[in-house]
Image: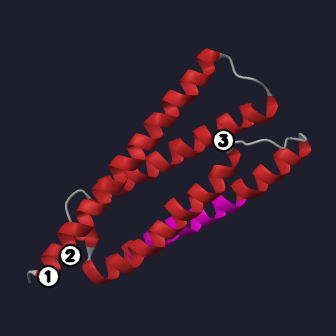
C-alpha cells in the first residue's frame, strides 16, 4: 500500500510539472508569435492539473482508505487512463502549434481530430474503469 501511495504521488507530481510547463509554453509561444486568438495550447495546463495532478492526489486518499490497488484491473485502469491523458494532451499540443503557426489542410485537421478522439475515448474508458474499481472497493469495505 505504501509503495502504491508513493507511485500515485509521483504520477501527480509529474502531471503538476507537465501542467506548469504546458502553461508557460502556451503563454510564451503565443506571445512570441503575436497570437491573440483561441488555441488548444491553453487546454494542456488545465487538463494536466485537473485530470492529472488532482485526480491522482485524490486517488492517494482513496487508496489509503479503501485499498483500491488490490482490486482486479487496477493497474490496467491506471495505465489506460494515463495513456488517454497523454495522447489527448499531445494532440492539444500539436493542434495548438498548428493553430498558432499555420493553417492546417483538411486532411491533417481530420487526422489530428481522429487521434484526439482516440485520446479522449481512452481517457474516458480509463476513468470509468477507475470509478468501477473505486465502487467495488467501497462496496467490499461497506460489506465487511
Residue that mark 1 sits on? 142
| Range covered by the magenta-colored residues | 5-20
Q: Is residue 37 magenta?
A: no
Residue displayed at 42% across by 48% down:
123
In the rendered image, residue 43, in percent from the top left (x then y), is placed at 63, 51
83 vs 94, nearest the viewer = 94
Up the image or down, 68 lies above or below 142; here it is above
Q: Nearer the viewer, residue 62 or 9?
A: 62
State the residue in front, 4 or 12: 12
Q: Return the x and y of residue 134 as percentages of the image width and height.
A: 26, 68
The answer for how far apart the CA atoms under marks 2 and 3 are is 37 Å
Q: What label does residue 62 carry, if any?
A: none
Mark 1 to mark 2 CA distance (whole Å): 6 Å
**Mark 1 secondary-structure assignment:** helix
Residue 93, label in figure: 3
Q: Are the two marked residues, 3 and 1, in contact with CB atoms closer than 8 angstroms?
A: no
Q: Earlier in the sequence, mark 3 or mark 1?
A: 3
Compared to residue 103, the image places residue 15 above or below, namely below
Examine the structure image and report whether residue 11 is included in the region drawn in magenta: yes
Instruction: Measuring from the top left, give residue 84's x and y in whole percent.
Output: 45, 46
Q: Are marks 1 and 2 in contact (CB under 8 Å)?
A: yes
Q: Is residue 1 visible?
A: no
Residue depicted at x 15% and y 74%: 139
Check disc 2 and report the residue beneath it.
138
The residue drawn where x is 30% and y is 54% is: 128
Amino acid at each position: 500500500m505504501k509503495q502504491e501511495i508513493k507511485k500515485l504521488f509521483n504520477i501527480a507530481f509529474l502531471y503538476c510539472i507537465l501542467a506548469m510547463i504546458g502553461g508557460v509554453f502556451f503563454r510564451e509561444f503565443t506571445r512570441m508569435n503575436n497570437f491573440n486568438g483561441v488555441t488548444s495550447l491553453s487546454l494542456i495546463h488545465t487538463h494536466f492539473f485537473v485530470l492529472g495532478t488532482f485526480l491522482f492526489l485524490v486517488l492517494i486518499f482513496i487508496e489509503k482508505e479503501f485499498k483500491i490497488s488490490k482490486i482486479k484491473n487496477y493497474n490496467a485502469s491506471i495505465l489506460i487512463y494515463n495513456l488517454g491523458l497523454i495522447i489527448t494532451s499531445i494532440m492539444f499540443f500539436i493542434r495548438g502549434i498548428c493553430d498558432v503557426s499555420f493553417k492546417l489542410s483538411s486532411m491533417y485537421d481530420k487526422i489530428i481530430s481522429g487521434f484526439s478522439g482516440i485520446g479522449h475515448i481512452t481517457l474516458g474508458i480509463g476513468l470509468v474503469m477507475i470509478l468501477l474499481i473505486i465502487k467495488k472497493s467501497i462496496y467490499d469495505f461497506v460489506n465487511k
